[in-house]
Image (cartoon, rainbow, N blue to C red):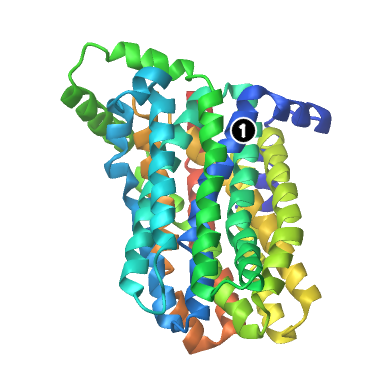
């Protein structure tokens, strides 16, 4: 694919002014999606980077820390229980709140309980129970993500999809920042008041469990999507088993009959791999450079938060103003090249300004790439009868890179050293860009536009 081809494809979309792009963010449906995005982003770091800092401080070795990426397995398997979310009702909650909102509140209650259980573990004494607690958090989080994704796709009209995706991703990243920097600040604050380290971490995680209530309030304030209501009416006379079978089989067979489906699935797996491969080891890298927990937390919470918000809204503007394939090119290249900022930081060493710059670049480019990727995944889901199942399958595939392909990142870092490790993180983006060029030449994106 040449540069002129990319520009030409982007010119097919109508131009959008900044004022038009920003006004839609104040729509009630978009605001609901924003708060649900925060709730979805919150738990990922609690079983990921924040937990890794806790483990590193407790003396756990880098190899074991890298293997803890495997606790993200539920994110790759959530499509297995997504048909239940599409087809079945939660007792009482579904009757009171509706098909999607009932599942939302149920998943959020499970998530709060799982985070509290993880808070009671101790990495220094019982790594097995830490892994089990993290697995429960990831399972509840994956269930919540499945419902939120279906709710978002079904509730937002076409005119609000770009703003909804940008708001969701920006809030998702804010949730992650709160559960990293915010949690680390809380732990330090508890230690400063005299708490033992284990107790400080426990209460820090308990506070994060309380943050999930933000998403629950949003779910209660929302209205059931009209598409979900119509799908519910269409299957109201079917048995539970029939509805589950329809959701499961229909979702897979409809998707697998599409043109170039295996290339599409491979692209979904690989597009964010460059981000996840480097991101798995970012927190241990910063600690190994000599930065304190509070240094890392302050920069992530301040500079990182601002970069995430700007990047999220920039991604939303691009998604409305340019074609999907042009946006994917921009996002894919930016998120890959951003890893060089950490390679540079490895040479600079203990310098807070250098860390701030690296965190800014990573958060800004990652937010752009994620917004555009969410737009792509949403465009692949075309039936309200199995929105949750199809999106869960795609999101689960996208988590393969973070969970399995990145599991050996710690060993790679040990073998190569930090500068070369982050340079290699750039190169792992090449296969996804080759697939993007191939799919564009095959007319994949024109087919998606015709289906809208």
Q: Is residue 430 visible?
A: no
Q: Is residue 152 visible?
A: yes
Q: Position of residue 195 (x, y in %)?
A: 57, 71
Q: Secondary structure at mark 1?
A: helix
Relative vertical location of residue 198 with respect to residue 396 in this rendering, above or below: below
- Which residue is pictured at 47% across the width and 84% down the height? 59
- Which residue is pictured at 70% across the width and 60% down the height? 301
Foreground of the two, 337 or 232: 232
* Horizontal arrangement in the rendering, residue 23 relative to residue 365 (left or right): right
Foreground of the two, 117 or 418: 117
- Residue at the limit of the structure toward the front, as seen here: 194
Q: Position of residue 159 (x, y in %)?
A: 64, 23
Relative vertical location of residue 8 with respect to residue 117 in this rendering, above or below: above
Q: What residue would you read off at disc 1?
A: 164
Foreground of the two, 328 or 283: 283
Foreground of the two, 117 or 249: 117
């Amino acid at each position: 694919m040449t540069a002129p081809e990319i520009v030409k494809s982007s010119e097919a979309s109508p131009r959008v002014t900044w004022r038009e792009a920003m006004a839609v963010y104040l729509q009630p449906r978009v605001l609901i999606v924003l708060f649900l995005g925060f709730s979805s982003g919150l738990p990922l770091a609690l079983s990921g980077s924040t937990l890794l800092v806790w483990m590193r401080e407790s003396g756990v070795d880098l190899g074991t820390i890298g293997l803890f990426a495997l606790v993200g397995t539920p994110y790759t398997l959530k499509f297995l229980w997504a048909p239940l979310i599409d087809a079945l009702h939660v007792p009482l909650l579904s009757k009171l709140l509706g098909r999607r909102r009932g599942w939302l509140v149920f998943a959020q209650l499970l998530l709060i309980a799982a985070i509290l259980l993880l808070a009671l573990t101790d990495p220094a004494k019982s790594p097995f129970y830490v892994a089990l607690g993290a697995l429960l958090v990831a399972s509840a989080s994956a269930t919540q993500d499945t419902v939120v994704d279906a709710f978002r796709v079904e509730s937002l009209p076409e005119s609000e999809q770009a703003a909804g995706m940008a708001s969701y991703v920006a809030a998702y990243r804010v949730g992650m920042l709160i559960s990293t920097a915010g949690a680390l600040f809380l732990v330090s604050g508890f230690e400063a008041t005299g708490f033992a380290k284990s107790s400080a971490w426990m209460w820090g995680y308990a506070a994060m469990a309380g943050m999930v209530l933000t998403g629950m309030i949003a779910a209660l304030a929302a209205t059931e999507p009209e598409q979900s209501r119509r799908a519910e009416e269409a299957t109201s006379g079917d048995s539970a088993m029939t509805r589950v079978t329809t959701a499961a089989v229909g979702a897979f067979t409809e998707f697998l009959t599409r043109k170039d489906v295996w290339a599409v699935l491979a692209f979904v797996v690989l597009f964010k791999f460059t981000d996840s491969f480097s991101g798995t080891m970012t927190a241990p890298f910063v600690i190994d450079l000599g930065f304190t927990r509070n240094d890392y937390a302050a920069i992530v919470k301040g500079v990182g938060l601002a970069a995430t918000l700007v990047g999220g809204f920039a991604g939303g503007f691009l998604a409305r103003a340019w074609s999907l394939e042009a946006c994917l090119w921009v996002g894919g290249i930016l998120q890959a090249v951003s890893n060089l900022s950490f390679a540079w930081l490895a040479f600079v060493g203990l310098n807070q300004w250098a860390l701030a710059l690296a965190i800014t670049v990573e958060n800004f480019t990652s937010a752009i790439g994620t917004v555009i990727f969410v737009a792509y995944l949403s465009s692949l889901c075309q039936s309200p009868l199995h929105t949750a199942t199809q999106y869960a399958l795609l999101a689960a595939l996208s988590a393969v890179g973070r969970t399995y392909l990145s599991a050996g990142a710690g060993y790679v870092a040990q073998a190569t050293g930090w500068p070369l490790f982050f340079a290699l993180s750039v190169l792992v983006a090449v296969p996804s860009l080759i697939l993007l060029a191939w799919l564009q030449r095959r007319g994949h994106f024109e087919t998606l536009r015709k289906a809208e």
